[in-house]
Image (cartoon, rainbow, N blue to C red):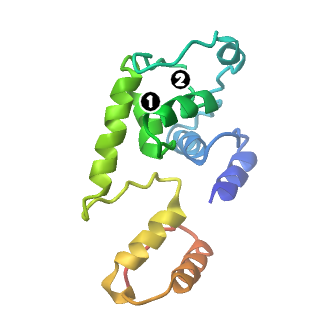
Amino acid sequence: MKEELQTFCRVNRISPSGSKIEIANRIETFLRTGEIKKPIRTSRINKKMEPKSELSLDTVITESHRCSQDVRAFFKTVIPKFHFSTYIQNYFKNNVGKTYRDAVNAWYEEEKRKKDPSYKKSIAPQFEYNQFIRDFFADPKNQGKSQNEAIKAWNNIKKLPGSNKYIPV
């Protein structure tokens, strides 16, 4: 759990700030090398001072791209059911230099993939609970069990030391 990682950081004089992934990466570096890495801080001052420009399908995705309310409003004019999914946020992050038109096409491609019955949205590693619940219900022994039973199993495993991954018994 993030709180446990932060406690480990405080005991070992490592910064406990940032996302769970960032904290885990700093701990991993510390355990492998003994090095204490500082968190990467990005300045928000420059991002706020950037001049607002008119958004269009030809707007180029930059390194300083923000998933802001202005961007959401623009995309809703093009994609009525638009929302910032993890997929589209990662698309912006990993496709600097492409345009909003490319992002619109990527959005529709992802929506098409979601309709495939075999499609499983990937779950980022920091969302252990979500992954545990998915894996719990994927286990044939848990067919017909309730959400409450899955949550009870989660609560039991997270009390134990070690990994919080679902392991079929």
Up-down relation of residue 67 to residue 86 (above or below):
above
**What's the residue at 55%, 28% (across, down)?**
71
Residue 151 position within the rendered picture, expressed as x and y whole percent measured from the top left = 57, 79
| Residue 22 visible in the picture | yes
Residue 15 position within the rendered picture, expressed as x and y whole percent measured from the top left = 71, 38
The image quadrant where one finds the C terminus is bottom left
In the rendered structure, the answer to whether residue 11 lies left or right of residue 154 reads right
Q: Amino acid at mark 1?
A: Phe
Is label 1 in a helix, a strand or a loop? helix
Real-space CA distance between mark 1 and mark 2, rounded to the nearest whole angstrom:
7 Å
Q: Are marks 1 and 2 in contact (CB under 8 Å)?
A: yes
In the image shown, does 25 or 109 lie closer to the viewer? 109
Q: Residue 14's quadrant in the figure?
A: top right
**What's the residue at 47%, 53% (across, down)?**
125
- Disc number for residue 92: 1
The image quadrant where one finds the N terminus is bottom right
Residue 124 position within the rendered picture, expressed as x and y whole percent measured from the top left = 46, 51
Is label 2 in a helix, a strand or a loop? loop
- Disc number for residue 65: 2
Q: Name which of mark 1 and mark 2 comes first in the sequence.
A: 2
Dot 1 surroundings within 10 Å: few (below 14), some, or many (20 or more)?
many
